[in-house]
Amino acid sequence: MGSNLFVNYGEAVAMILFAIGLSNLLLQKNLIKKIIGLNIMDSAVYLFLAEKGYITGRLAPIVTNGVQSAEAYINPIPAGLVLTGIVVSVSVTALMLSLTIRLYRRYQTLDLDEISLKIKMEGK
Amino acid sequence: MAFYQNIPFFSIFLAMFAGTVSSVLKRKAARIFNIIVISSIMIASAVLAVFLYREGISYTFMMGHFPAPWGNEIRAGVLEAGMALFFCVIMLLSMLGGHHKLDEEVEETKQNLYYVVVNLLLSSLLAMIYTNDLFTAYVFVEINTIAACGLIMIRQIGRTIEAAVRYMIMSLLGSGLFLVGLVVLYDLTGHLLMSNIREAVTSITANGEYTIPLLVSISLMSAGLAIKSALFPFHAWLPDAYGYSTASSAAMLSSLVSKGYIFLLIKIYYRVIGIDLIRSYRLTDVLFIFGLAGMIFGSLSAIKENDIRRMIAYSSVAQIGYIYMGIGMGTQAAMLASVYHILMHGATKSLLFIAAIGLTDVSGYSRQFIQITGAGYRNKIAGIGFTVGALSMVGFPGFSGFISKLLFAQAALQNNTGKMLSALIVLGISTILNAIYFMKTVIRIYTPVKDSEYPVRPLKEQKLYATVIVAFVICNLFLGLASVFIEEWIQKGLAIFG
C-alpha cells in the first residue's frame, strides 16, 4: 500500500486538499473563508479526476496528425466531468456569495456565530 | 417503443421549461401556468404508473444518440413512476395550501420567482427519481440544493437568510462527499451508468479486489446523502430552515427535498452496489444506529420546543430517523416499511405545516403555544387538519402513520440479526414521545378560551385552503386504508428496482 501512495502522489495530494477544503468549509467562522474552503474542496475533486484520467504517453483526446486509433489518446469523459463539475461549483459559489452579501449588509459582519447572536437579539 | 415510455423525459423537461417561462410571466399568470404544468406532469405520471403496474416491468430510455455504455439513460419502473406521481400531488397541494401566505410574506415583484424555484425543484426531483446515470444524479442533487435554498430565502428576513446559509453549508458538505465517493467509484469501475457499474462491482468483488476503496466510496456517498437528508447529528440547519420559511416552502422542504435524497440513496444501494454487498460491509448497521438516535433525540428536541412550526420541524428529524432505521435493518420487509414511511411522512408533514399556518393566522400570527390556545375553534378546518396529521404521526389506527409503524414492527420481528429488540424498544419509546408532543398540541388548540382577543375565521373566507386540507386528509386516509394495495405496489417496484 505504501509504495502505491508514492506512485499515485497526485491522487494523495488531491485527497489532502479535499480534507483541507472540507474542514475549512465546516470549521471556519468567517463566511468568505468557508466559501474558499468549498472551492478548495471542489478543485481537489477535479484534480483527482484529471489525475485519474491521464495515461502517461497519450495525447489529449483531439485528433492530431490524422491518428485515428483510440490507443493514442486518453479518455475524454473525466475531462467532461471536470467541466460539468466546474459549472456546478461556479453557480453554487455565486449563490453563497450573494447570500453572504445579503447577510453582511444586514448585520455588518461576516462571522456566522455573531450573525446568529444578532438575529437572536432581534428576537423575531 | 410504446408512447408512454416518453413520459419521464417529458415530465423532467416540461418542469424545467416551465421554470424558464415562469421567470418572465406576471405573478398571477406564473401561478396558473405552474398549476397547469404540475397537474399535467401529475396526470402523465399517473398514466405511466398504471401502465407499468399492469405490465410489471421497468425499461430504460436512451437520452441522445449514444447507446448504453457511453450515452445517458433514464430508467423508469413501477416504484419510480409512483414516486413521481406522489411528489407531484404533494407539491401541488403544498403550493396551493400556502398560497395566501406567499402573498403576505414575499415581495410582489418576486412572487413569480417562487414558481421558477418550484419548477426547478420538481424537475430536479423527477430527474433524481428517473436517472440511470450517477453523474447526472450528482448534477441534479446540486440543482435540488440550489432550488431548496431559493425556497428558504424567498421570504427575506434575517432568519431565513441565515438558515439558507447554514443549509447551503451542510448541503455542500454533503454533495462534496457524494461527489468524491462517485469519482472513486467511477475510477474503480470505469462506468457512470448504474447498471454498468453494478456489473463491474460484481466482477470486482468476485475477484476480491479493491475491497477498501469500494467501501470508502460507498461510505462517502452514504454519508453525503445522509447529511443532505438531515439524518440526526447533521440536522442543526433544519429547525430554522423549516420553521421560518414561508409555509409552502416548509411543506415542500420537509416532505419532498429530503425524500428525494433518500430515494437516491435507496437507488444506489439497490441498483448500483447491490444491497447484499452493503449488508456484508456492515454499512447498514451504522445507518441503523444513527436512525435510532435520530428517533429519540429528534422527538426530545420537539418536546422542548415552544414554537409550533419548529416543533413540527424537529419531528421531521425523528421521522427521517425512522426511514434510516428501516434502511439500516437491511431486509426487504424493512425497506418496504421505509418506502411506505417516505410516502406517509410526505403526506402528513405537509398537512401539518399547512394546518399550522391556519392556526397561527387566527392567533395574531404568533407561533407560541400560549397564543394558539383554542385556535382549533377559531379556524375549524385547520384544527381538523392538524388533529388528523397529529393522530397519523402518533400512529392512530386508520391513518397512514399506523400502517408504517406496523410495518416497521413486523420487519423488526422478522429480523433475527439482533436488531429486533433495539428496534422495537426505540420504536415504542419514540411513539410515546411523539404522542406527548403532538397530543399536547392538539389538547392546547382545543382548550376553550373565554373572550378570546382574536377573531374567528369562518370557512367561507378560505375555500381554497379548506379544499387543500380536505385533499390532504383524503390522501392520508387513502394511504392508511388502502395500505394493502400500496404495499403490493411498493413490493412490485422494489422487486424490479435493482
Image (tube, grey):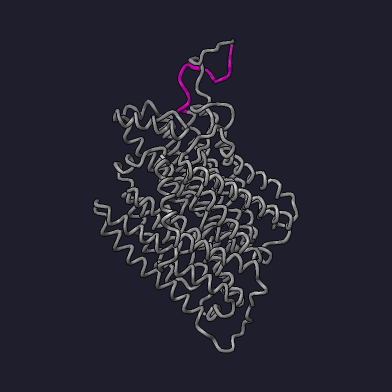
| Residue A22, above or below B456 | above
Q: Is residue A90 above or below residue B119?
A: above
Residue B259: in sight, yes or no? yes
Count the marks: 0
Name the one closer to the observer, B398 or B152.
B398
Residue drawn 64% across and 61% down? B156
* Image quadrant occupied by the N terminus of chain B: top right
Decide which of A43, A87 is in the foreground and name it.
A87
Residue A13 shows in the view: no
Q: Is residue B467 magenta?
A: no
Residue A53 is situated, as x and y percent measured from the top left of the image, at: 47, 26
Q: Quadrant of the C terminus of chain B?
A: top left
Residue found at the very far front of the displayed protein: B54
Residue at 52% over, 43% down: B51
Apparent side of residue B214 relative to residue A65 in the rendered image (left or right): left
Horizontal and vertical percent position of residue A44: 48, 37
Q: Which residues are magenta?
A: A51-64
Q: Is residue B158 above or below residue B148?
A: below
Residue B456 position (above or below residue A1): below
x then y, percent, for residue B86: 53, 53
